[in-house]
Image (cartoon, rainbow, N blue to C red):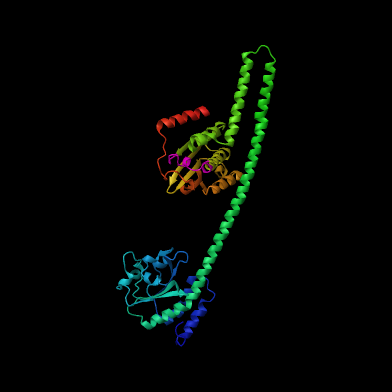
């Protein structure tokens, strides 16, 4: 405070007592408004607070007349503030007899409409600063012209110097709280990802054991049986075509079963023909044994952008879609499944929609599968959403993957369409593989 002999010392002390214990900028202003009014009659008072993490923006906290400065709801650029020179530290203070006519408040892009809307004429603006750094400003206005003097400017600065340390403490406290919340959220996400990855690893181990059992119980048993049949046939002098035909069919069935097991372990169609063809093949296999017919469609409006990305990302997306499809068929009682791959801005969006009518539309019935989907999405820095469209509307599982995670060889949005004869060739190859 500049003058310890100030006759208004008692009111300054009252202001100091009023701010004690307040934990919010608005509450501080409400507590001191009466004492400030005794020192400086006003119709509007606000404090502009410079954002500590983004010093190019500020927020306004008001008492008295409410204006769009305080109602903005978000930080505003200092470049558009009528008092930008003060907030930047380029001038020490501002005092004007009529802000309506004072050109320093009005410039191209200035957020000056509240001056007219709230009928603010006489104005005083002084900085809030600690250790020589400006953290905001105290702003006092009157509806009348030519109200404030140079002595009032000194009084306003005394008030600002008095409350500045308290506002600085509030700013630092809010920063610390925000940092603590962000750190807690990050720890929570890391722990959730760790737990999810553990469950995924356990699931993969169970899947490995399942495949081993299938190979042992099915394929190995079939091959052993065929081996014994061959042994018996080798001891015969005369072989009939019927005997050889049965052996041929057994070998063909064993080959088909082995191909299915291998495809489940590593989707070869995905590697050979891309994600869209692999999803189409997965849908065809998944709905084949369903007692009720299920219509399916796969639409990729990105011209195969995911096939230009890393293989782990493509496989993760395929596995998420695979789980979503199987879950819809198993629990959703659906008659239609639509898979769509599209691009929204800088995000690739993959959705699996069904018209299921089962409990909760079915997608929340397989907890382990959903956990795996969440972890797979997190591991490729994608977001996973479950969207219930309501009665008679599709339920969707949506994956949103930032384009940055694809590390494309070409620019995003490049046309990756394969020539027509190549598409036909791919389709023929796919049919031959199946």
Q: Is residue 306 magenta?
A: yes
Residue located 66% across and 35% down the image: 212
Q: Is residue 313 magenta?
A: yes
Location of residue 24 in the rendering, given as x and y in whole percent from the top left corner: 50, 70
Can residue 392 be seen here? The reply is no
How many marks overall?
A: 0
Q: Quadrant of residue 2?
A: bottom left
- Figure check: 115 above or below 359: below
Residue sitting farthest toward the front: 409
> With respect to residue 258, does 317 lie above or below?
below
Residue sitting farthest toward the top: 238
Q: Nearer the viewer, residue 231 or 326?
A: 231
Residue 215 appears anywhere in the view: yes
Give the image location of residue 140, x and y in percent.
40, 75
Up/down of 221 relative to 328, above or below: above
Q: Residue placed at 43% from the left, 64% from the top?
A: 75
Range drawn in magenta: 300-314
């Amino acid at each position: 405070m500049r003058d310890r002999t100030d006759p208004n010392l008692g009111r300054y002390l009252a202001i100091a007592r009023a701010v004690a214990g307040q934990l919010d900028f608005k509450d501080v202003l409400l507590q001191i408004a009466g004492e400030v009014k005794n020192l400086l009659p006003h119709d509007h008072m606000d404090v502009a607070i410079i954002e500590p993490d983004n010093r190019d923006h500020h927020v306004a906290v008001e008492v008295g007349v409410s204006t769009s400065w305080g109602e903005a709801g978000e930080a505003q650029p200092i470049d558009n503030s009528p008092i930008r020179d003060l907030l930047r530290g380029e001038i020490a203070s501002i005092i004007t007899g009529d802000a309506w006519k004072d050109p320093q408040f009005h410039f191209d892009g200035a957020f000056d409409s509240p001056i007219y809307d709230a009928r603010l004429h006489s104005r005083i603006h002084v900085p809030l600063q600690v250790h020589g750094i400006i953290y905001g400003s105290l702003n006092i206005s009157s509806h009348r012209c030519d109200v404030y003097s140079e002595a009032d400017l000194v009084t306003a600065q005394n008030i600002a110097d008095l409350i500045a340390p308290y506002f600085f403490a509030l700013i630092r406290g809010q920063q610390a709280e925000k940092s603590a919340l962000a750190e807690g959220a990050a720890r929570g996400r890391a722990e959730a990802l760790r737990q999810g990855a553990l469950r995924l690893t356990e699931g993969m181990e169970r899947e490995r054991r399942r495949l081993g059992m299938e190979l042992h119980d099915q394929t190995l048993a079939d091959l052993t049986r065929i081996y014994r049949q061959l042994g018996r046939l080798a001891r015969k002098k005369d072989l009939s075509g019927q005997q050889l035909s049965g052996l041929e069919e057994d070998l063909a069935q064993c080959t088909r079963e082995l191909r299915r097991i291998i495809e489940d372990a590593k989707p070869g169609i995905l590697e050979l023909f891309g994600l869209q063809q692999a999803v189409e093949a997965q849908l065809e296999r998944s709905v084949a044994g369903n007692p009720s017919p299920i219509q399916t469609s796969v639409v990729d409006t990105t011209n195969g952008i995911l096939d230009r990305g890393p293989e782990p990302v493509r496989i993760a997306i395929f596995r998420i879609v695979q789980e979503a499809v199987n879950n819809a068929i198993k629990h959703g009682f659906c008659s239609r499944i639509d898979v769509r791959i599209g691009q929204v801005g800088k995000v690739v969006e993959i959705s699996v929609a069904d018209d299921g009518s089962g409990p909760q539309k079915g997608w929340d019935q397989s907890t382990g599968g959903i956990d795996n989907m969440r972890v797979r999405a997190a591991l490729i820095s994608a977001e996973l959403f479950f969207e219930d469209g309501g009665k008679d509307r599709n339920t969707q599982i949506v994956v949103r993957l930032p384009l940055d995670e694809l590390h494309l060889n070409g620019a995003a949005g490049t046309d990756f369409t394969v020539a027509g004869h190549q598409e036909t060739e791919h389709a023929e190859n796919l049919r031959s593989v199946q």
